[in-house]
Amino acid sequence: MTSKFLVSADHLTIRFPRTNAPDLIASRAVNLDIAAKETVALVGESGSGKTTTGRALVRLLTPSAGKVWFDGKDVTHIRGQALMRYHRNAQMIFQDPFASLNPFHTVAHHLSRPLTRLRHLKGHEREEALDEILTLVGLTPTAIYREKYPHELSGGQRQRVAIARALAGGPSFIVADEPVSMLDVSLRAEILTLLESLQERRGLSYLYITHDLASARYLAHRIAVMYGGSLVEIAPAEDLVQAPAHPYTRLLLAATPGSAHTGPLPETMQSAPDLSEDRKGCPFAPRCPAVMDRCTKTMPAMITVADGHQAACYLNE
Amino acid sequence: MTEALSVDSLHVSYFTQNGLVPALRNVSLSISSNEILGLVGESGSGKSTMAQAVMRLLKPDTATVDGRILVEGQDLYQLTPEQLRLARWRDIAMVFQSSMNALNPVLSIQEHFTDTMRAHLPDISEAEILKRTADLLGQVRLDPAVARNYAHELSGGMRQRVVIALALALDPHVLLMDEPTTALDVVVQRSILDEIAALQRNRKLAVLFISHDFSLVSGLANRIAVMYAGEIMEITDRGMAIEDVSKHHPYTQGLMRAAPRLIGSKVSIEGIPGEPPDMSQVPPGCPFYDRCPLRLPMCRTTPLPVKTGRVYIRCHAMPDPVSGKAVAHDV
């Protein structure tokens, strides 16, 4: 497969087996392409499959079906050395900077490991690389921050260390899983603008996983919306916010703090989507104010509604 | 007219190994029935201490509390333990942040309601308890059959609704809510906020709604108090419209400029440089001095002016929102 995209999910499916119940499909035939130097935000509620999809793209999970492509190569089932080489290129930033750093290790220790394992740096070279990435994420003077333990850092500084660790291998693609949701508002802005400037300087591609449409609109070029394991809409960020084409996206926009929506929410009932293997039709059908007969029988394919804007909803036919 | 809740010059300090550390300083606000006051602040600003102090939940060996807290005119800190027990829940109730921890896992939802009502109304009949429980659950849009369930059988949104219904069990006039929707998905959060707004209107409640989320609170509250380093910097009734940003306290301005927006034209965001002060060494002047873009030389050493009223800004560099007159004079 040759394409202009850096990373692609191609009918990506992640299945979690259950006993005494049909298997759970956390990510169901998801197609998602991310270009070089592009930020795609993946938005949805808890349990929608955002994190599972992100983890599969950096190959912390092996897909049950479908493919993951990186730079034209099939990385779906790579293992061992090949997987380690892939992790130089594809890294992850986790949500909770309190849980993702080891309390017994210094900042320098956290950053030395990927420099050694992924880039095989030693001695003086490694120390220089370490200072360079600390400077890049704004933890200066580096001599002081190198020796700090996580408990000596604020939440924002910890998340900077986590970002530095993700940068250590020299990646071109980073999955940032809710990187600011645990932080105070004033720190969120600093981390979001740091991610922006790193993209500029290092030519990074991001998959920005979030439940917050406002920050997705700010950071991303395109926004993809997941519901119940399925991708339901993808569009340039501004189009998605101004002209949503899927009823779930409309609901999400109406409910987000800061929206201009007043009155009842556009949903018929509150319920959690069915993630089981034998689900038929659109996962949003039970809540959808515009549900039609066929919505409960077959899942609509992605339908193009505008340039670069697709939604999986029969309303757009 | 008596305010439903009035807090007057509240000071709270915690006993620590390094001596007394202030958590709330000179906090004054009042809420009348029929309004929601949002209390917004970042981690460590004193929001939750505020809720605990108002409920008189701080133990005398952990913290010192000075100032007056009046609920419907009665001073909570003058009550005997038995009077206090009766006043809580009947006059002033609280919804805690984590609904999973607020419900007892080995009691059914019905038993929570039964315990609460029996503790305050010893003569209440079983039939009356069941009737009131069903009614309360209906008011938060839950099926009354939920009463037979246990907490772990309910979703996060349902549990939070149960906790809200439970807080209303004795028909209090004042309701404190500490981040009641923080762990929930946005759609569930929004529908619970709509219910809170409806309950507040129908019951003429005075609600103190504590949150870290400025945009969430501005959609709900009539007024917003902004807290920083244990002090209320501003009480505003303007919401967070971006065109009014310069009319707010410099700290509020910083918060507003830091938050990405969903509507309107896309604007750039910027954080507030620096960090909140170490509360064991708060400076004598304005606690925001180190981070403030509008600071004057006097702000470093001159304490913030004490203000009362429905809306105010405590800042040497900003005009007063009511009189419009600059409060600062060159010193």
Image (cartoon, coloured by chain):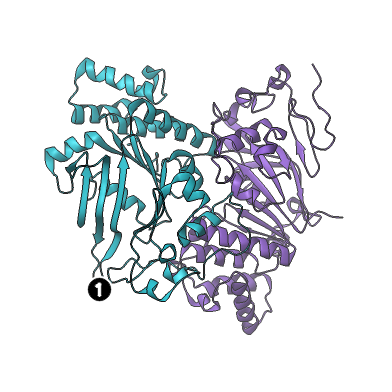
Image quarter where the C terminus of chain A lies is bottom left
| Position of residue B322 in the picture relative to residue A137 (left or right) | right
For chain A, give the colour.
Answer: cyan
For chain B, give the colour.
Answer: purple
Front position in the image: A39 or B22: A39
Q: Which residue is mark 1?
A: A20
Residue A251 on image: x %, y %:
51, 60
| Position of residue A200 in the picture relative to residue B229 (left or right) | left
- Neighbourhood count class around disc 1 (C-alpha, 10 Å): few under 14, some 14–19, many 20 upward: few
Residue B142 on image: x %, y %:
55, 72
What subunit carries mark 1? A
| Position of residue B149 in the picture relative to residue B196 (left or right) | left
| Position of residue B274 in the picture relative to residue B51 (left or right) | left
| Residue drawn at point x = 63 percent, y = 49 percent | B217
| Residue drawn at point x = 20 percent, y = 38 percent | A86
Q: Is residue B330 above or below residue A67?
A: above
Q: Is residue A213 above or below residue B275?
A: below
Res A212 seen here:
no
Q: Is residue B207 above or below residue B215?
A: below
| Residue drawn at point x = 37 percent, y = 67 percent | A282
Front position in the image: A119 or A143: A119
Residue A74 on image: x %, y %:
17, 45
Q: Is residue A311 above or below residue A198?
A: below
Res B217 seen here:
yes
Q: Secondary structure at mark 1?
A: loop
Residue B91 on image: x %, y %:
72, 62
**View extreme (right): residue:** B1
Q: How many marks?
A: 1
Image quarter where the N terminus of chain A lies is top left
Quarter holding residue B308: top right
Quarter holding residue B320: top right
Say what amino acid the circle numbered 1 marks: Asn
